[in-house]
Image: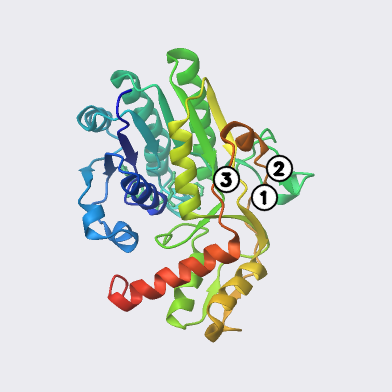
Amino acid sequence: MKESRFLVTGAVGCIGAWVVRNLVRQGTPTTAFDLSENKDRLRLIMDQSELEQVTFLQGDITDLEQVKHALRSSGATHVIHLAALQVPFCKANPPLGAAVNVIGTVNLFEAAKAAGIPQIVYASSVAVYGNKERYPEKLIPHDAPLFPLNHYGVFKQANEGTARIYWQDDGIASVGLRPYTVYGPARDQGLTSTPTKAMLAAARGEPYHISFGGSNGFQYADDIAKTFIAAALKPVAGAEVFNIKGSVAHMSEVVAAIEKAAPEVRGKITFEDLLLPFPEGQQDDKLRDWLGEIPYTPLEEGVAQSIALFREALGDGRLS
Ligand SMILES: NC(=O)c1ccc[n+]([C@@H]2O[C@H](COP(=O)([O-])OP(=O)(O)OC[C@H]3O[C@@H](n4cnc5c(N)ncnc54)[C@H](O)[C@@H]3O)[C@@H](O)[C@H]2O)c1
């Protein structure tokens, strides 16, 4: 069998960094494609010898020729597509958001077609759904009606459609995963990044006010990275899209987990009583049926691991 070689787009972002770390630790040849050359997130969770095993390719997902070049030169057999602009960036600049998130995804499929890559795994999002009031169930099934309430969610919905058409017309298989609130070291931007910022503040012994509340889904960054890799390695015949559950918890439980790992900030981590425009959580039975065991770190443990890693990084200067 041909050796697996991975191309990861958005590889210096949060989930990308954790995907790259896991691939390197498995000994899988990996090319990291990103517009940004800033490797701080990777340095936070990987050592120098691990970083040296990665091939870095700076490029723009909105430029088809650059994406084609990335797939050709990397010799990729597997692709994980994470490059995107998150909710606030899409809101601030919808045309750029559409270019990166929608055209970028079309480019990736087009380049995969040219390179003969049989399957793409890409990040969709819980943002394809509407807010909590729209659904009778607390945990919504994978086939609940989509009703995105921001540009970002509309762009993700478009990507799910793009994937479906590339399967229909060109036989390129795909798996879209819909994370919710990804947390853990390297999660430093985006609408749902404030719980992780609170963990970093706690590691510093400082107060922090989380920007939203209510009950939401949470996925530890290492778990979600492992799930993307497992999905890439498992062949699928179709354009599948899966909900991801992780932990469904009220923000008060996140705060309790932070206070347990960092008792010195007890009473100093607070949250806004504001609901996200998403459902309370997602059912993941369809993903379980297909993938089997899903990597899962309980919330309390993921929060404790995050704070421990932040403390280490503050101690040795990886974080200032
Ligand atoms: N973090 C979450 O909670 C979450 C939840 C649901 C879905 N997602 C999706 O998962 C994926 C990864 O999210 P993340 O948290 O790692 O985001 P991130 O913002 O940390 O990383 C995104 C990366 O994409 C890169 N990028 C932006 N524009 C680019 C371009 N034109 N060409 C190439 N690269 C470009 C950025 O430089 C960045 O490194 C995204 O598709 C995101 O929408 C994330």
- Residue 306 shows which numbered tag? none
Q: What element carries label 1?
A: strand
Can residue 279 be seen in this snapshot? no
Q: Nearer the viewer, residue 230 or 148?
A: 230
- Residue 127 shows which numbered tag? 3
First in residue order: circle 3 vs circle 1: 3
Image quadrant containing the N terminus: top left
Instruction: Calculate the distance from the C-alpha at mark 3 to the C-alpha at mark 2.
Output: 13 Å
First in residue order: circle 3 vs circle 2: 3
In the rendered image, residue 305, in percent from the top left (x then y), is placed at: 48, 66
- Toward the top, the furthest residue is 169
Q: Which of 85 and 174 is in front in this view?
A: 174
Q: Nearer the viewer, residue 196 or 106?
A: 196
Reply above or below: 145 against 187. above
Which residue is denoted by mark 1 in the rendering?
Answer: 281
Can residue 12 be seen in this snapshot? yes
For discs 3 and 1, the disc positioned in front in the rendered view: 1
In the rendered image, residue 163, in percent from the top left (x then y), is placed at: 48, 26
Is residue 64 found left or right of 301 in the rendered image? left
Is residue 130 found left or right of 103 in the rendered image? right
First in residue order: circle 2 vs circle 1: 2
- Toward the bottom, the furthest residue is 264
Image quadrant containing the C terminus: bottom left
| Residue neighbourhood size for the residue with mark 2, other residues' Cα within 10 Å, grouped as few (<14), some (14–19), many (≥20) | many
In the rendered image, residue 280, in percent from the top left (x then y), is placed at: 69, 52
Which residue is denoted by mark 2 in the rendering?
Answer: 140
Pointer 2 with pointer 1, Cβ within 8 A:
yes
Instruction: Residue at 47%, 71% (x, y): give it.
Output: 307
- What amino acid is at disc 2? Ile
